[in-house]
Every structure is written in structure tokens, then in C-alpha cells.
């Protein structure tokens, strides 16, 4: 077992040092160049849609940490196997670092807007791991023999000498008398050793004369623990090099953490320094009777995106470029955007990945610059039908131009619920479009807008089979009682939300045990771009019951009953909750 665990540990140590160096270099290149993050992003891009939907549905916002953890586990297993392989086949053991370095470099170079230098962290980390495995003596991984103090071993006993008898000592010496350092010391010679082979080769060796061999420097015949084995490093080498590599790994890893933390601190200072101007058009006040929880707290607002590390941008360095099929390209910095005259609106956003009754929907009070006037100033050319938004980390979102110009409150948002955007929701600027699923109308960390056509360019999710146009489908959800709740008989308030952004909700109905549909009470709301809170007083009777809900939008269309998955343009079906009444 020790023959496996020790070299496996050496492989892990070498890999940890390589990863630490790569992470340190990535802080100087860009976060997307970090090998584990780059490989994770490549996995996200390459995963089939059903796999992605399963991950979002099953793990929710924990899908990203689990992915990073899985990549780390796979790396650890490969590193351990590489260490074991290097013990017996040193050159073949270099295959592990080579594969890992190539995978990390290739993943980094396939990121949007990648540069050749993005491959540097992965390649440097792999090279460091290879050097540690091949050159530096680590536990369980051999190296070329060392020369040191000569040690003489006796030839086979002379004829007539009892086998196993002690060989003669130098003249004037005794068995208990210590010998000067460097003095040849007679030691027993095991059968089949190199000296025996010398004898069998025909070379004349006088009977009883000592035969010289060598032990590594710093070792003695009475200290077999001082060597790792013939041709291997001494225990002193192992300890010294192991400590040195571990210390270097800790220093490099700590340096990467500190540099990233420094960057995060700078970004936090940039956000804290933002002073949002008063809007030129305020949101309509919520009517009396609106229930608590109408606005979703920033900390509770859902997050669904592909960013494995949250971009932390500096507002002072932010720039937006509007170009493409326009007569007058526009470039804005953050201060110029704030000066355009901001509007404040209550808007509900929803994610297409949400199943029927799912959690990926929320309402916030947004502050931002209207997008339609900016497009008109740029002069959209005839034939253009798509606005492609690009984020700082390379995500592309394609939105129909006619949707953005039809009078809805599409905006470049800078504020959320009275404060600058949180980093997780797009600071310093994000695009949002009421009535359109996020994948087709809401780009976080936006830095570029290109007026184009659907024929000329497919955005990120469209290339993966999702619909080009993605208006939000009418949906409703039961928030209370919760599934499988146990309730007391009598009056029970069934409540939830319904949404059909930009069309509004005209009615919500509740059915118990497949019976008649009963109208629910709609609480007041101020806009068709938000969800509607509803409630229904149910006279609950003992037993098991099934509650279901459906909504009718502002056009009179009733929410369809048929269950369909989110792919390719949003889920449909009636949300159902089972409860027990006692």
C-alpha cells in the first residue's frame, strides 16, 4: 500500500504546485484564463442541453460550485495516477501534466475573445508539475543514483570458513571501536548482489578480501532508513524537497488569492463610490393592498448564468460600444450613461430554465437608461432585426429589434431596488427587456451592443437550440401552502403569483381535486410588466387534496394545461400542489 500511497501523494503535491502557479499567473492575464475555470466553462459550453437542464433543475445555484469541485476531483485522481506511474515509468509519467496542460490551454483559447497569452497559465502550471515529477526528488519517485562514501563488503568466505562468520577487521581494530569517517566498513553481502555477480563473471577476488561498494552520501550501512532505495533520494532529500514544494505551493496559492482579493476590494470600492442620480421618471407607486414581498430582495433574487466566476468590473473603466448596422456608432462611459436621464420601473424577470412552479422569477425596482432612444440616436439601418449584446466574459444575447422599439421599458440598468447593481446581477450595467426571457433579452455585465440580423449571427443559446424569439409565457405558481404541507381543517388561504410580462394578468383561478375552477382575488399592481399577487380562501376539509392554478393574460389567452419542458422556449402547464388536511 505504501508503494502506491507515497508516489500518489507526490503526484498530488506536484499537481497542487502547478495549479497554484497557474492561478497566480491567471491573475495577471485575466480570470477566464485560470485552467480550472476555463475547463469548467468549456464543459458548460459543450454539455448537451438535457444535461444543463438537469443540472439547473437539480442543483439550482449550486451547479457551478459542484462543477468546479468535480473538475478538482478529476484533477486530483489524474495527478495521483501520474505520481504512481512516474515511480516506475518516469517518462511515461509526464503524460499526465502534458494532457492537463493541453486541456487547460485549449479550453482557455476557446473562450470568447481569447488571446494567445490566455494559454500561458495552463502551460506554465503543467511545466512546473512535470519538472517536479521528473527532476526534484519526491517521495516514492526515483532518480539517478547518488555517489557518496565508499563501503566495503566482504567477498564470499574462503574455503573452510564457516558461512556467516564475521569478516576480519582491519589490523588494530575491534568490533566495538568506531571507525573514522570515510573508512571502508565491511558489511555482509546479500546473495545475488552486484559483488556476487562480479565474482560469477570470472574476475579474480582473493578469498576473504573485502569488496567495495558505495552508499549515498550522508548514509551508512547501519542506517538503511537514510535512503529511499538504490538509485533513489535520501530521506533527507524527500523531506527537504517536499517541504520546499509545499511551501512554494502555499505561497503561489496565497499570492493568487491575495491578488484576486485586492481586485475584488478595488471593484467593491468602485461600486461603493457610485452615486445614482434621481430618475427623470419614477416608478408608479404600488397601490394600497399590495402584499409584502412584492419586490424580491437583491440577496434573494435568482441567478442563472454561465459565469463560473462573477466578473467584478470597475465602473470608472467600463465602456459600452454600440456599432454594427447603424449610421452613427456610439461609445459611452459610465458617467455619460448616468447623464442620459434615467427611468425607474418595476419589472419582473423570469428565466426560461424554470420548470412549472419553479423559482427562477423575481421582481425588482430597476433604474436605468432607456435603450430605444439610444438606438434611434445611432440610426438603425434598414434590414437590421437583431440587437446582439455581449458581456465582459463573452456571453452573447440576441434580442429582436422590433421588441426593443415597441415602446416597452427596455433599458440599460444601473440600479436595483435602490442601490447600484450587485456584482452577481451585472454591475456596473446590465441590459433587461420586459416580457422576454432572460436568455434573449437580459445581458449582465454588458460592454457591447451590435445591431445585426438573425441571419448573420446566432447568439449563445440560439446556437444550442433555443428559440430566437422568446416572449415570456403566461405562468402562475402556488407559494402557499407548500407541497405536502399538513393543514388544519377550516379556512385556508391559498396564495401565489402569476405573470405574463408586457401583457399583464387578467384572472387567476384555483381548482381543488380536479373540480370547478374558482376565481382568485388579484391584489393591486401598477404595471403589466410585473407579476400579480393572488389569493384564494379555501374551505379545507379533512383528507388528501390536490390544488392547482391557472392564469389568463391580458389578451384573454388562458395558460395551457399541457406540460412541456423549458426547452426550447419555456415551460407550460398548471402548477399543482398536494396537501393533507386533518
Image (tube, rainbow, N blue to C red):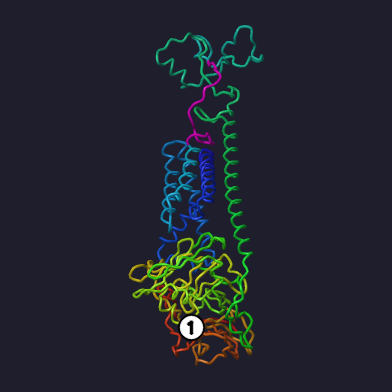
Residue 538 image point, x, y percent: 59, 90
Quadrant of image for the C terminus: bottom right
Circle 1: element type: loop
92 is higher (above) or lower (below) than 361:
above
Which of the two residues, 143 or 112, is positioned nearer the viewer here? Answer: 112
From the viewer's perspective, tell me whether residue 98 is left or right of residue 519. left
Which of the two residues, 337 or 290, is positioned nearer the viewer here? Answer: 337
Majority secondary structure of the magenta segment? loop
Residue 225 sits in quarter: top right
From the viewer's perspective, tell me whether residue 383 is left or right of residue 163. left
Measuring 57% from the left and 45% from the top, which residue is drawn there? 252
Q: Any magenta on residue 148?
A: yes
Check disc 1: other Cα within 10 Å, few if <14, some if 14-19, many if 20+. many
Which of the two residues, 6 or 247, is positioned nearer the viewer here? Answer: 247
Look at the image and give the residue range highlighted in magenta.
134-153
Q: Residue furthest top?
A: 171
Residue 386 image point, x, y percent: 39, 73
Q: Which residue is mark 1?
A: 502
Q: Residue furthest front?
A: 328
Which of the two residues, 415 or 44, is positioned nearer the viewer here? Answer: 415
Q: Any magenta on residue 286?
A: no
Q: Residue furthest right?
A: 177
Residue 478 image point, x, y percent: 55, 82
494 is higher (above) or lower (below) than 376:
below
Amino acid at each position: 500500500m505504501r508503494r502506491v500511497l507515497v508516489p500518489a501523494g507526490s503526484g498530488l503535491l506536484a499537481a497542487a504546485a502547478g495549479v497554484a502557479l497557474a492561478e497566480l499567473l491567471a491573475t495577471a492575464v485575466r480570470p477566464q484564463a485560470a485552467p480550472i475555470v476555463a475547463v469548467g466553462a468549456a464543459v458548460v459550453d459543450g454539455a448537451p442541453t438535457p444535461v444543463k437542464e438537469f443540472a439547473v433543475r437539480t442543483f439550482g445555484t449550486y451547479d457551478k460550485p459542484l462543477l468546479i469541485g468535480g473538475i478538482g476531483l478529476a484533477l486530483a485522481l489524474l495527478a495521483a495516477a501520474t505520481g504512481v506511474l512516474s515511480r516506475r515509468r518516469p517518462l511515461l509519467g509526464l503524460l499526465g501534466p502534458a494532457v492537463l496542460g493541453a486541456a487547460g490551454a485549449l479550453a482557455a483559447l476557446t473562450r470568447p475573445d481569447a488571446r494567445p497569452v490566455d494559454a500561458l497559465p495552463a502551460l506554465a502550471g503543467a511545466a512546473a508539475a512535470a519538472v517536479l515529477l521528473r527532476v526534484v526528488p519526491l517521495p516514492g519517485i526515483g532518480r539517478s543514483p547518488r555517489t557518496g562514501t565508499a563501503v566495503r563488503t566482504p567477498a564470499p568466505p574462503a574455503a573452510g570458513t564457516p558461512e556467516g562468520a564475521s569478516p576480519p577487521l582491519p589490523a588494530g581494530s575491534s568490533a566495538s571501536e568506531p571507525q573514522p569517517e570515510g573508512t571502508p566498513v565491511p558489511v555482509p553481502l546479500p546473495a545475488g548482489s552486484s559483488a556476487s555477480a562480479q565474482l560469477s563473471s570470472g574476475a579474480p577476488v582473493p578469498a576473504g578480501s573485502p569488496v567495495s561498494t558505495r552508499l549515498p552520501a550522508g548514509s551508512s550501512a547501519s542506517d538503511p532508513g537514510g535512503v529511499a532505495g538504490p538509485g533513489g533520494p535520501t530521506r533527507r532529500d524527500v523531506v527537504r524537497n517536499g517541504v520546499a514544494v509545499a511551501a512554494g505551493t502555499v505561497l503561489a496559492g496565497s499570492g493568487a488569492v491575495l491578488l484576486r482579493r485586492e481586485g475584488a476590494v478595488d471593484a467593491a470600492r468602485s461600486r461603493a463610490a457610485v452615486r445614482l442620480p434621481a430618475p427623470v421618471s419614477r416608478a408608479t407607486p404600488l397601490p394600497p393592498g399590495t402584499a409584502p414581498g412584492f419586490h424580491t430582495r437583491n440577496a434573494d433574487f435568482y441567478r442563472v448564468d454561465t459565469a463560473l466566476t462573477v466578473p467584478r468590473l470597475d465602473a470608472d473603466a467600463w465602456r459600452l460600444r454600440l456599432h454594427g448596422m447603424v449610421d452613427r456608432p456610439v461609445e459611452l462611459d459610465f458617467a455619460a450613461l448616468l447623464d442620459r436621464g434615467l427611468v425607474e420601473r418595476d419589472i419582473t424577470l423570469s428565466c426560461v430554465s424554470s420548470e412549472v412552479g419553479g423559482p427562477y422569477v423575481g421582481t425588482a425596482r430597476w433604474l436605468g437608461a432607456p435603450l430605444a432612444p439610444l438606438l434611434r440616436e445611432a440610426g438603425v439601418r434598414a434590414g437590421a432585426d437583431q440587437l446582439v449584446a455581449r458581456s465582459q466574459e463573452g456571453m452573447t444575447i440576441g434580442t429582436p429589434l422590433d421588441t426593443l422599439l415597441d415602446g416597452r421599458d427596455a433599458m440599460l440598468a444601473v440600479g436595483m431596488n435602490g442601490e447600484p447593481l450587485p456584482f452577481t446581477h451585472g454591475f456596473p450595467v446590465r441590459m433587461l427587456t420586459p416580457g422576454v426571457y432572460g436568455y434573449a433579452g437580459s445581458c449582465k455585465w454588458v460592454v457591447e451592443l451590435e445591431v445585426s440580423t438573425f441571419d448573420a449571427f446566432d447568439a449563445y443559446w440560439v446556437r444550442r437550440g433555443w428559440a430566437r424569439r422568446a416572449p415570456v409565457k403566461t405562468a402562475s405558481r402556488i407559494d402557499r401552502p407548500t407541497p405536502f404541507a399538513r393543514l388544519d381543517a377550516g379556512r385556508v388561504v391559498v396564495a401565489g403569483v402569476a405573470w405574463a410580462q408586457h401583457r399583464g394578468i387578467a384572472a387567476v383561478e384555483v381548482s381543488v381535486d380536479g373540480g370547478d375552477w374558482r376565481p382568485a382575488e388579484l391584489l393591486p399592481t401598477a404595471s403589466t410588466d410585473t407579476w400579480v399577487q393572488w389569493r384564494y380562501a379555501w374551505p379545507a376539509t379533512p383528507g388528501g387534496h390536490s390544488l392547482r392554478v391557472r392564469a389568463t393574460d391580458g389578451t384573454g389567452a388562458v395558460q395551457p394545461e399541457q406540460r412541456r419542458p423549458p426547452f426550447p422556449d419555456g415551460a407550460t402547464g398548471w402548477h399543482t400542489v398536494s396537501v393533507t388536511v386533518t
